[in-house]
Amino acid sequence: MQQSTLNIGLLGCGRIGQVHARGIAQIDSAAVFAVSDAVEAAANALAVTTDAQVMTPEEMLTNAQVHAVVIGTPTTTHYDLIHLAAKNGKAIFCEKPIDLSAERIRDCLAVVKQHNVPFFVGFNRRFDPNFAHLVKQVRDGAVGDIELVSIISKDPAPPPVSYIDASGGLFRDMMIHDLDMARFVLNEEPIEVHAMGTSLVDPDIGKAGDVDTAMVMLKTATGKLCQISNSRRASFGYDQRIEVHGSKGMIRAENVYENTIELATESGFTKAPVQHFFLERYEAAYKAELQQFVSTVLDGIAPNPSGDDGLKAQLLADAATEACFGAGVVKLS
């Protein structure tokens, strides 16, 4: 695109919309031009802090002064918003998951391709400085050929059951981030998915038909293995770790702590708690992914992560769900 500043419309002014608004404010070549939310007060409040216009989704997506949109609305709204945005030539940043149905995701990718608009999916963990450095080291051969990847992701506390009902389940809602990271780290597509899950944190989650504690094993065509463990509860904070074992050694990204202080006394060594929630843990990642999106649009480069990455992560989440609730193992073509 020729313009020097990318005017962005924010669809969704809740928690993630506010995070993205703060990120855009730190990018010289972008600005929040318009905001929209089903809750009028939320839209008005964010409009004040960003000096943006309040619009309906239809007004925003048909306004020629809006060059791109960030979709941070509930997943059930993504499909229609993506179609309308693509038909009006808007570059699209969409939070994960694109949709809870792989077929509907394919429909979204088709309309995006038809109208030739950039489509960027918000897998923010790829942009975490620690994880990104780990992946670069792996790509550079620091640990040799990958043999085993371990990804650990635990939330500090479970969401309400009302959220579980509309989320698509742990594998599609929570683990989808880790499934994308598995693909990103392995740099190879899994062909086999094993999964187990149980409800140990909140019995109401089990009654709602979901699990809150799960493990998945992925295998690639060349035999590389990846194990992912998720829990909706970690009493010590937001647990986010990756380890890659290879033919020449091992590399790992540890948790991020509230500070780097370590106290040593006769009782032993104590450190600060890990950062407690995803907003603080991935603050730098959210900013970096938005910078990448803006560069993608202004410089005309291919989106990464792309809509295809969103589809492939969803297919893995679907396979993990199927494996957990009956099949045990699912083989992918």
Image (cartoon, rainbow, N blue to C red):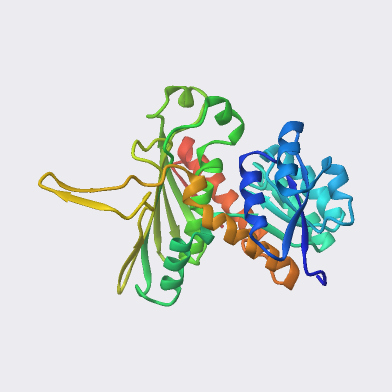
Image quarter of residue 231: top left
Observer-nearest of 59 and 222: 59
Counting from the top left corner in percent of width and height, residue 198 is at 40, 32
281 to the left or right of 269: right
Residue 147 against residue 176 in the figure, above or below: below
| Residue drawn at point x = 29 percent, y = 53 percent | 261
Counting from the top left corner in percent of width and height, residue 256 is at 39, 53
| Residue drawn at point x = 56 percent, y = 42 percent | 172
Counting from the top left corner in percent of width and height, residue 53 is at 82, 46
Residue 49 against residue 221 in the figure, above or below: above
Image quarter of residue 134: bottom left
Counting from the top left corner in percent of width and height, residue 139 is at 45, 73
| Residue drawn at point x = 74 percent, y = 57 percent | 31
Q: Is residue 55 shown to the viewer in this render?
A: yes
| Residue drawn at point x = 37 percent, y = 38 percent | 234
Observer-nearest of 21 and 122: 21
Q: Is residue 39 shown to the viewer in this render?
A: no
Observer-nearest of 114 and 58: 58
201 to the left or right of 271: right
Q: Quadrant of the C terminus?
A: bottom right
Residue 53 against residue 295 in the figure, above or below: above
Give the residue at the far bottom of this rendering: 140
Image quarter of residue 86: bottom right
